[in-house]
Amino acid sequence: MPHSSPFDLSGDIAFVTGASAGLGRHFATVLAKAGARVVLCARRYERAAEAAAALPAGQAVALAGDVTDGASMQHAFRQAEAELGPVTLLINNAGIADDHTALDLPEDDWDRVIDTNLKGAWRLAQLCARHWVERGAPGNIVNIASILGFRVAGRSLPYAVSKAGLVQMTRALSLEWARHGIRVNAIAPGYIETDLNRDFFATAPGQALIKRIPQRRLGQPADLDGALLLLASSASAYMTGSVIAVDGGHLNSSL
């Protein structure tokens, strides 16, 4: 049956990483409302299960999985397909940051951020793509990058490097996998208000940062919904290798 709208995700099965809280949980909810069945995958299984339980019965499952552990993700992917069916959409959202200066950054912290944000995203992209190619089925990947993949800020070295790598990985994979009917795009959010950063943005330094955003406000998770639904759906059928900034104009601000 044809979709009634190009943004209708009925029939899609979406695998969302880092889905226990914050943007990952929000993305899972948005995709479910658009008709997709959703796998909420996260290290914190209890919180992912809580989020899945808030969605309509039979439309979501929660699975434990660590994107830095290949065996863990292989198991989660197999379990997802056993419970919901073949995955058609990957939202590579899992990510962490570090607050050290470059001079003080421990090597283990560098590895932890790069392994989660960049290598973890590659691992899931390759895992999904291999299954799609073997089946002769199309697939869709949306990577969650950041405007720090294009600009820099203090005390964010491994995060900025990982997101810049994710932007280039999006472009490289899109080129290689287009012939297989696999699309790879990315969203680059600016500063989005979440439970993790709300207290900071209430401080004087946080308020000063907000004033440097051309729209003079933080983004809200819902501000990402349009880009997410565009890239996740057939509305973007002729898009691959694209990176959409959703940042209140921050990338265009003067240096």
Image (cartoon, grey):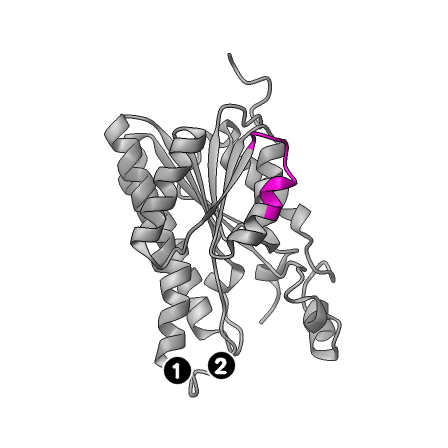
- Using the rendered image of the protein, determine whether residue 211 is visible from the camera's viewpoint: yes
Indicate whether residue 7 is drawn in magenta: no
Q: Residue at x 67, y 64 (%)?
A: 213
Q: Secondary structure at mark 2?
A: loop
In the rendered structure, which amino acid carries the disc numbered 2? His
Q: Is 12 rendered above or below residue 253?
A: above
Q: Residue at x 59, y 21 (%)?
A: 5
Q: Which residue is mark 1?
A: 106
Instruction: Please name whichever residue, 240 or 143, is drawn nearer the observer in this view of the structure.
Output: 143
Q: Which residues are magenta?
A: 50-59
Q: Secondary structure at mark 1?
A: loop
Q: Of all residues shown, which one is farthest toward the front? A: 46
Q: Is residue 45 left or right of residue 198?
A: left
Instruction: Please name whichever residue, 67 or 233, is drawn nearer the observer in this view of the structure.
Output: 67
Question: Residue 75 at x, y = what percent?
Answer: 34, 45
Q: Is residue 27 left or right of residue 111?
A: right
Q: Residue at x 59, y 17 (%)?
A: 4
> Which of the marked residues, 1 or 2, is nearer the chain's N terminus?
2
Q: CA distance from mark 1 to mark 2?
A: 8 Å
In the rendered structure, which amino acid carries the disc numbered 1? Pro
> Mark on residue 100?
2
Question: Residue 237 at x, y = what percent?
Answer: 45, 29
Q: Of all residues shown, which one is farthest toward the top? A: 1
Q: Quadrant of residue 84?
A: top left
Q: Residue at x 49, y 27 (%)?
A: 234
Q: Are marks 1 and 2 in contact (CB under 8 Å)?
A: yes
Q: Is 104 rendered above or below residue 152?
A: below
Q: Of all residues shown, which one is farthest toward the bottom? A: 103
Instruction: Please name whichever residue, 59 or 36, is drawn nearer the observer in this view of the structure.
Output: 59
Q: Quadrant of the C terminus?
A: bottom right
